[in-house]
Image: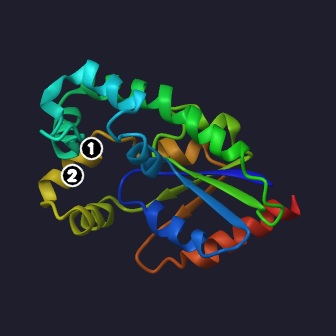
Amino acid sequence: MKIIGITGSSGSGKTTLSKILNEREDVKVIDADEVVKEMSIPGTKYLEAIKETFGQEVFLEDGRLNRKRLAQKIYNDNESREKLNKLTFNYVVKEIITRTKSITDKNIKFAIIDAPLLFESKLDNCCDYVIALIADFDLKVRRICKRDKIDEETAKSRLNIQNEDSYYTEKANFVIKNSENCDLKSEIEKIFKEILKG
């Protein structure tokens, strides 16, 4: 089994690619964002650590995390974003590695770690290969607006605090330019063939 990291900035198409991969019987996808959501339920150590760091203001009255409030806080404050990333790397990375190691199905040829902060969290160290998705800035803005139902300025400000595409392309083994007419299914098939050949 090969462990493959998939990364890229917001709007590059990671979620779409993961959906395509989830349809394959020889692939197991571990989505970092989903793991974060699962670990953000009341009673978990990760959530307690968030409360200790950011206080009650990022929580709803019923004890659940107020994702919108937390997102606003970290998008406008570098220090807060770094604090949250540090917590996430500490708790979530361990969980992702555990889930990857626990795959025992012999039919699985590829374990996929879908993580926007793959390099920053050092998760790339446990990957055999890394695939970066890139796309034109304006296209990413349109995708984010549609997906998150936000205005163009908010989408642009989110992208502006993220790494540029060159950050990913310099570090990745494979790069998919996910333009509007890109056939992701065919692109990933080519990459998998190359990996299995090598």
* Residue in the foreground of this view, choosing between 93 and 121: 93
- Viewed as shown, does residue 123 lie left or right of 52? right
Rate crowding at label 2 as few (under 14), some (14 to 19) or many (20 or more) other CA atoms within 10 Å.
some
Q: Position of residue 198 (x, y in %)?
A: 87, 58
Q: Is residue 180 above or below residue 139?
A: below
**In which quadrant will I find the N terminus?**
bottom right
Mark 1 and mark 2: span between their CA atoms?
A: 6 Å
**Amino acid on which the number 1 mark rests in the picture:** Asn
Residue at 25 percent across and 67 percent down: it is 142
Q: Which of the numbered marks, if any, corresponds to residue 6?
A: none
Q: Secondary structure at mark 1?
A: helix
The picture quadrant where one finds residue 66 is top left
Q: Position of residue 122 (x, y in %)?
A: 58, 31
Q: Position of residue 166 (x, y in %)?
A: 48, 45
Considering every residue shown, the one lying at the far right of the view is: 197
Residue at 67 percent across and 46 percent down: it is 100
Q: Which residue is mark 1?
A: 160
The picture quadrant where one finds residue 50 is top left
Q: Which residue is mark 2?
A: 156
Residue at 30 percent across and 67 percent down: it is 143
Q: Secondary structure at mark 2?
A: helix
Rate crowding at label 1 as few (under 14), some (14 to 19) or many (20 or more) other CA atoms within 10 Å.
few
Residue at 36 percent across and 40 percent down: it is 40
Q: Position of residue 164 (x, y in %)?
A: 40, 45
Q: Is residue 20 above or below residue 144?
A: below
- Viewed as shown, does residue 99 lie left or right of 64? right
**Amino acid on which the number 2 mark rests in the picture:** Lys
Residues marked 1 and 2 touching at CB (< 8 Å): yes
